[in-house]
Amino acid sequence: VCGDGTILSDVLASQVGVHEQYGGVKPDAAQAAHKENIDKSVEAALQKAGLTSGELSAVAVTVGPGLGLCLEVGIKKALTIAAEHR
């Protein structure tokens, strides 16, 4: 998202297939799916926006709502990106 609110990219990694077999969300499976997809999702979003992580001026991440195990994956990724481009 640009400073003026323009959305440059929107990427979705669905986990529907992961949880169907359990009849609902299985937290450890959700966390594993987040870990498996986070790097690909971030790279796809950057590519779609025509940017590299080094061109970012800020990094944002949600802390809820959601499963703590899954939110932790996003928080760690955001912290990693921020630390790499301090």
Image: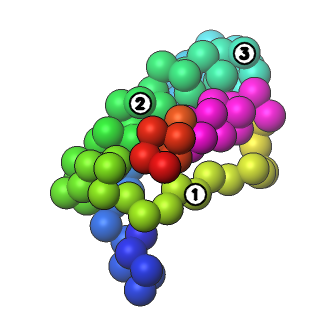
* Residue 78 in sight in this render: yes
List x then y, in percent, for residue 71.
Answer: 70, 38
Q: Residue at x 39, y 38 (%)?
A: 41
Q: Residue at x 38, y 58 (%)?
A: 56
> On screen, 85 above or below 39?
below
Q: Is residue 71 magenta?
A: yes
* Residue 14 in sight in this render: no
List x then y, in percent, for residue 52.
Answer: 26, 49
Q: Amino acid at mark 1?
A: Ala
The range drawn in magenta is: 68-79
Task: Specify which label sits upstream in the sequence, 2 or 3.
Answer: 3
* Residue under pointer 2: 39
- The figure's colour scheme reads rainbow
Q: Is residue 72 magenta?
A: yes
- Foreground residue, 85 or 78? 85
Q: Amino acid at mark 3?
A: Asp
Q: Amino acid at mark 2?
A: Asp
The image quarter containing residue 31 is top right
- Neighbourhood count class around disc 1 (C-alpha, 10 Å): few under 14, some 14–19, many 20 upward: few
Magenta portion: prevailing SS class: helix
Front tag of 1 and 3: 1
Q: Residue at x 75, y 27 (%)?
A: 69
Q: Residue at x 34, y 48 (%)?
A: 53
- Neighbourhood count class around disc 3 (C-alpha, 10 Å): few under 14, some 14–19, many 20 upward: few
Kind of element beneath mark 3: helix
* Residue under pointer 1: 60
Kind of element beneath mark 1: loop
Q: Give me the C-alpha separation between circle 2 and circle 3.
A: 18 Å
* Residue under pointer 3: 28
Query: Quick check: marks 2 and 3 in contact, CB under 8 Å?
Result: no
Task: Specify which label sits upstream in the sequence, 2 or 1.
Answer: 2
